[in-house]
Amino acid sequence: MRVFQIRQKFLRAAFLTLGLLLFSSLHAQKVAVKNNLLYDATLTPNLGFEWRMSDHWTGGLSAGYNPFTFSDNKKWKHVLVSPEARYWFCDIFAGDFLAVNAVYSHFNVGNVKFPFGLYPSVKTERRQGDMVAAGASYGHAWLLSPHWNFEFEVGADVGYTWFDRYECAKCGAKLGTDKKAFVMPRLSVNFVYVIK
């Protein structure tokens, strides 16, 4: 019950912040819609929105949802929400930027082999729980046309997760509960449409 209350409070705060940022900057008349191609590669549908707050600042919100279970009960089910603020060195939506972000995710992951040896125990057990994180990143946006951009972003997030552990078999026995701090990489390759 406590986890559900924490999740509700975090989501409420994220949407309240988003609403305040969005409504305070509606006069900006510059909004972008984006899709993270790397996230698509994990079969996770995702969409992000970003809007101008001033000459050098934008605010944004990205979300992803993966409801799929594959053969051998392999799954990386999750919902993820990530608000972000960016400082652009020249013009917004063009050139270099620095960003800070927050992340919330509810997940159900099991029987998955992650690249580079990340999270090796998820190959042999299923984990279901929540995580929160915050981080910073650097990125660059290339103008492809007056409305289309291509964006690359790299950084790191520091966070905390709490989850239940289960045997990998479908409906496997509960092995225990765990919680831990972590550091994870942040990498985005976004295709962006700018609405002027």
Image: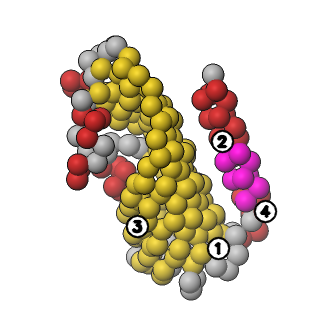
Q: Secondary structure at mark 2?
A: helix
Residue 167 placement (x, y as % from top left): 30, 20
Closer to the chain start, of discs 3 and 4, is 4
Residue at x 55% of width, y 56% of height = 134
Answer whether labels 3 and 2 touch (C-beta < 8 Å): no
Residue at x 38% of width, y 43% of height = 44
Closer to the chain start, of discs 1 and 2, is 2
Look at the image and say whether residue 76 sits in the magenta stretch: no
Q: Is residue 15 above or below residue 121?
A: below
| Residue matched to label 3 | 154
Judge whether residue 36 can be spotted in this image.
no
Residue numbers of the magenta segment: 13-21
Residue 24: mark: 4
Closer to the chain start, of discs 4 and 2, is 2
Mark 1 and mark 4: span between their CA atoms? 13 Å
Residue 193 placement (x, y as % from top left): 49, 64
Mark 3 and mark 2: span between their CA atoms? 25 Å
